[in-house]
Amino acid sequence: MKPRRSIAHDPLAESEIMKAFYKPNIAKKASEAGAGLVKATFYLDPNDIVSLEELQLTIRKREGRKANKSELMREAIALLVKEYSK
């Protein structure tokens, strides 16, 4: 006779396919953030946010790819550093 399983038993937890499909969120977030990046918070004017989002749409239309705000801010900082380092 088979042992009776409780309601708390999760049959999918034993599946190798499910283990490979559902990976921990920690690994996913680390790869999304990129190596060596540090989270920073800035306060911006609402008009600057609108401009940044419009720039995202422009890049999406022109290049067919999504540009994230972090990428755009890193590029803007690089341009500022280049300008003021002269």
Image (cartoon, rainbow, N blue to C red):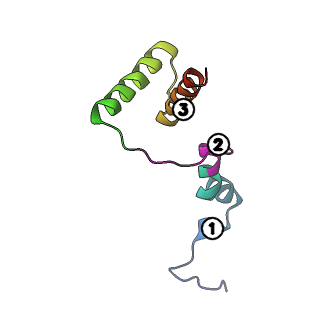
Given residues 42 and 20, the one toward you in this image is 42
Q: Is residue 54 left or right of residue 59?
A: left
> Residue 70 at x, y = what percent?
51, 36
Please state which amino acid type lies under the numbered disc 3: Glu
Q: Is residue 69 left or right of residue 51?
A: right
Q: Quadrant of residue 42?
A: top left
Judging by the rendered image, the residue that carries numbered circle 2 is: 34
Please state which amino acid type lies under the numbered disc 2: Gly
Nearer the observer: mark 3 or 1; the answer is 3
> Residue 48 at x, y = what percent?
34, 30
Nearer the observer: mark 1 or 2; the answer is 2
The circle drawn on residue 13 is: 1
At x 55% / y 32%, what residue is drawn?
74
On screen, 54 above or below 12? above
Q: Quadrant of residue 10?
A: bottom right
Any magenta on residue 39?
yes
> Residue 21 at x, y = what percent?
63, 52
Q: Earlier in the sequence, mark 1 or mark 2?
A: 1
Look at the image and give the residue range highlighted in magenta.
Answer: 30-42
Judging by the rendered image, the residue that carries numbered circle 3 is: 71
